[in-house]
Image (cartoon, rainbow, N blue to C red):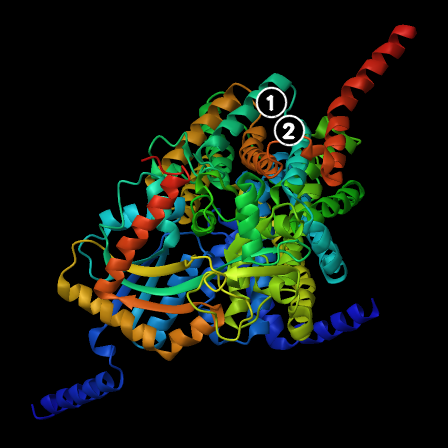
Amino acid sequence: MFRFPARLVGAAVAFTLAAAANPGFAQQLELKLMAPAAPGGGWDQTARSMQQALVASGVARSVQVTNVPGAGGSVGIAQFVNGAKGDGNQMMVNGFVMVGALAMNKSPVTLEQVTPIARLTEEIQVIVVPANSPIKNAQDLAAAVKADIAKVTFAGGSAGGVDHVMAALFAGAVGADAKKINYIPFSGGGESLAAILGGKVTAGISGLSEYEGQIKSGKLRAIGVTSEKRIAGSDIPTFKEQGIDLVIANWRSVVAPPGITPEQRKTLSDAVEKMVKSDAWKEILKQKGWEDAYLSGDAFAEFLKKETARVTDVLKSVGLVKS
Amino acid sequence: MMDTFAALAHGMAVAVQPMNLLYALIGVFLGTAVGVLPGIGPALTVALLLPVTYKLDPGGSLIMFAGIYYGGMYGGSTTAILINTPGESASMATALEGNKMAKAGRGGPALATSAIGSFVAGTIATIGLAFLAPWLVDVAVRFGPEDYFALMCVAFVTVSATFGDSPVRGLTSLFIGLTLGLIGIDKLTGQARLAFGVPELLDGVEVTTLAVGLFAVGEALYVASRRHHTEEKLEPVRGSLWMTREDWKRSWKPWLRGTMFGFPIGALPAGGAEIPTFLSYSTEKRLTKHPEEFGKGAIEGVAGPEAANNASAAGTLVPLLTLGLPTSATAAMMLAGFQQYGLNPGPLLFAERPDLVWGLIASLFIANMMLLVLNLPLVGLWVRLLAIPQPWLYAGILVFATMGTIAAKPSVVELSMLAGFGVLGFLMRRFDFPIAPVVVGLILGPIAESQLRRALAISLGDPLTLLQSPISATLLGIALIALVAPFVLKGLGRFKANED
């Protein structure tokens, strides 16, 4: 009878010590994280990186990643909103592309239904031309677009994605009619790169990291990036520096299901915040070349609303979404 | 050239380190296992292993990934041959003749020719990767939309090889496939077509779902329906279990020709593995000395496509290593693997980390060798599968097919499609329509359409762009000749006959 409580005390002390050393331990989070895309893409990589960082930093005990591919995330979000409602242990990765995809697919489920948690990363976008192109800078391209917009062909990713929206915004920013842009969607960077290198299109649009190798090796010329300020150590000017108001980034974020309690929301937000501040996450960002774009709480909810409105407007203006 | 040899020798030294050999072995084993299961492709396997390998050294885990990739290509063909269930779409052409051979008791030689053919093709293609990569990639990026469209035209002309006896029935099948190919979001305008408001249909029909439904489920239904008519007895082995001298003689040329199709097309950013397998199949059908055997189990029809399949896997690594361009889902995962170690594949990788690149290439040789050693002894074991009583075997196939489909896309819609395609496959068998053209239509249709529209959008609607590119003009010429030549030859034959 004497030993029993003593052992319990010992165990309790050990538990407390472990919990103190490892702040996430007490919560024992077991999360499910949905990547609404096939393995290999940006969302899948984000989800798997989160899995790695959440576990490595001790925020969660286990994280299970599921892939629900389909239609720019439309299939995944429908399943998430209906299937995970009120579940405080589930989250879904999403991003810019989903905003356009939901609008174009007339999805019955919208981003207003999910509970925003945080924006995590963003990738700066770039416009490139082949090295032997007469276009030297953003103003040259602007002049070409203004002269005859149909003749300027842009190669980029899927219709309605960030590259397409950016082409329309560029045309709008230089005072041309965005409705008339000649945008040619390719599936995947490989195909569009071939079209750009082969001089088949005027310009290419993509995430900066995708074409960085070609830019450094001199096969492609970057005529502008879409960040607010020049990237540290980079010699590529921003569009803003060149007098064109074009700021856009391919952001990725994480959201929770609808119908969770404020406490559950806080638990998830805190977990994500701890993860973002962990060394494991910083290491991953460096490896993948993702910019830290952490934005949480109401600020993120506000951002999501604004971005949805902006993207929907652009897609309407280019005729991809019928109003 | 000498530099390449020296670098390769150095790479060999890296690859034969015991730990790296072990990684390669684990890789090919896992790859073969997942290749056998339809649905769980190599891409998913690499994705699952990525976090696990975080702590390993970069060389070792990349070697393992390459092993999975090659192993997956091997494993897919085993089920295609034995139970008519292609593990991935690239082994569909293999199923055409391979399964017929298995049913005729020649499953052993079919598996052997596919294993050895894969080895030969993989080895030659890896040599190609080592020596031609920088040059080949320059050619590959010159391929524009109009050139891809012309390549698709060549592929379309050769589809007729899979038609069987009646061109009308063949064309009907092809058009079913082309129609299925229209389903989903239009790539150029982002608008949904034939999706009827079902979100799962927005991405189009999955090739593996269609292939598994038509081939495996359809076959099971058909066999069940015929059970009381004829008691068909499968003999697992008739004649030799191994390849005879005749088999060797008939296999080696298709192996080489398959490699010639697979490697360069695999290196194209939008080439893929399916197209070379079909080009190889139809070429073998045209060139064979035993045309009467095609459709009944001709060994050439297994040897060629299998070689093409594996050669294209090596081809995919050309743009990945030289440009950092992933052109398949597995390659995309491998790219993620590179990035995990802070490595950026591309023009600089060869210069910055030669030990890694050449170690990887050298380990591909070793992975190939291991796959051969792993697979040949298994042939005897595999063919015994066919001795299982038919009701059990086909029930097993149904379970297998369903499981694979759910693993790839866990959705009711996908499963309903599988069942629907199964019924379609049954009806087509019952009324004697060829099945392969449906799948070919689904693969080629969407590519041909979007590439043509891209080409026209770039040329501002001028169709002459198709003839202005030399690559496109040449390919269209080949397609035209392939289309017209049989008729002309037939006409000449008749002309001569009249003269007599």
- Secondary structure category for the residue under label 1: helix
Query: Which residue corresponds to mark 2?
Result: B162
Q: Is residue B396 left or right of residue B457?
A: left
Q: Earlier in the sequence, mark 2 or mark 1?
A: 2
Give neighbour class at mark 2: few <14, some 14-19, many 20+ (Cα, 10 Å).
Answer: many
Gap between marks 2 and 1 measured at Cα: 8 Å
Which chain hosts label 1? B
Of A212 and A226, which appears nearest the observer? Answer: A226
Query: Which residue corresponds to mark 1?
Result: B170
Residue drawn at x 33%, y 62% is: A64
Query: Image quarter for residue B366?
Result: bottom right
Q: Position of residue B473 (x, y in %)?
A: 74, 34
Residue drawn at x 37%, y 60% is: A252
Q: Position of residue B382 (x, y in %)?
A: 57, 48
Q: Amino acid at mark 2?
A: Thr
Query: Image quarter for residue A277?
Result: bottom left
Give neighbour class at mark 1: few <14, some 14-19, many 20+ (Cα, 10 Å).
Answer: many
